[in-house]
Amino acid sequence: MAECEGQTGAERGAQDLDQIFANADGGMPPDPEEIQEMLMKAQGKTIRMTMGLKMLSMVEPIDGVKFELMAPLSQRFQLGGSWVFSNTKANKFELQTALSSVVNPNAMFAQDEVSFVSTRSDSTGKLEFSGSLNLGYQTSLKAEGFFMDQDVQKSHLQFELMKEFNDSHISYKFGAGSYSLSMMQSLSSKLIAGFEMMYIPHTTDIHFCYGANYNHDIHSFYTQYIPMARKETLSVGYVGRPSRRLTLFSELKGSLDGFSDTILGFRVKFLEGIITGSFSSSFKATSVYRRVVENLIMLQFSSQIDFQKPEKPAVFGVSLSFGGM
């Protein structure tokens, strides 16, 4: 395997986080999603190479009103709940829990010390859980499950064994009716590439997925090929940061069935908050305004309109979150 030039992913992630907070002058709050992206790079980094793009292009507006509360009951355990009052769907309550082995916040970059379990359940009967047990030596065992209702046939369970190296990782997944082997490799300090081979015993099919991420200065390029996906078989994206306050992004998605969609968007940071806007070739416009106060309260306004379907009402939503920022 080629050695990654310079520092490890954890060291670069730590420095990126320091840079985010150092640049938060003039009263401008750090972007929570930017912080989350840096943490993903520091902890396993190459697990989802398109994270930086998807966090911008896949903004889902809230239809109605949402209240969310996350309370840290201890240094390791958090309990939270959310209430969604939708304009078009049934109202829903969701309960969340999170248990982590991390006590010292500075230990977030020491992967050998991090293990966690989180659960999510709502009033419709759905239950989700995910967990990670660090086995030491940069090896972890992960598990996730999804239960629609009491019918076991509708359940989904999957386990993953992952081994991290300084410039790559390799993982083996099994469950949910499939087996897969994946590998991500830092080919240089700017280029990350990887593949996943999936075997489905029920149909005896074998699928290969590929992805790559190239970063140079203020520019980031993403590409992903997933043959099983119906609409996003191939996606190519770009994220540029001309200044600390402005981010530009674009994404082209397509499939062999003739589907294609292009998204152009921006994110602007002001002292009063963050605005994200996008417009797609399918004539769908989305906008989100978010403001975080003292890292405790987050207020968000979102809207979306589909110009191809004028008979469909526009979507407007408000979200208010306390704690857990």
Image: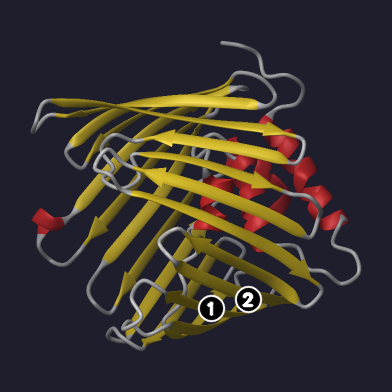
Marks 2 and 1 in Cβ contact (< 8 Å): yes
Q: Quadrant of the C terminus?
A: bottom right
**x%, y% of residue 51?**
53, 46
Q: How many marks?
A: 2
Residue 289: image tag: 2
Element type at marker 1?
strand
Q: Is residue 218 left or right of residue 320?
A: right
Q: Nearer the viewer, residue 295 or 87?
A: 87
**x%, y% of residue 254?**
36, 43
Residue lying at 9% horizontally and 31% vertically, measured from the top left: 203
- Quarter occupied by residue 76: bottom right
**x%, y% of residue 149?**
16, 67
Q: Is residue 219 left or right of residue 170?
A: right
**x%, y% of residue 12?**
74, 36
Q: Is residue 271 left or right of residue 305?
A: right
Residue 302: image tag: 1
Alpha carbon distance from label 2 to label 1: 6 Å
Residue lying at 75% horizontally and 58% vertically, measured from the top left: 246
Q: Earlier in the sequence, mark 2 or mark 1?
A: 2
How is the model colour-coded?
secondary structure
Alpha-carbon neighbours of circle 2 within 10 Å: few (<14), some, or many (≥20)? some
- Quarter occupied by residue 133: top left
Residue lying at 35% horizontally and 45% vertically, measured from the top left: 232
Residue 241: image tag: none
Q: Nearer the viewer, residue 107 or 310?
A: 310
Amino acid beneath label 2: Tyr
Amino acid beneath label 1: Ser
Q: Quadrant of the N terminus?
A: top right
Residue 323 drawn above or below residue 316: above
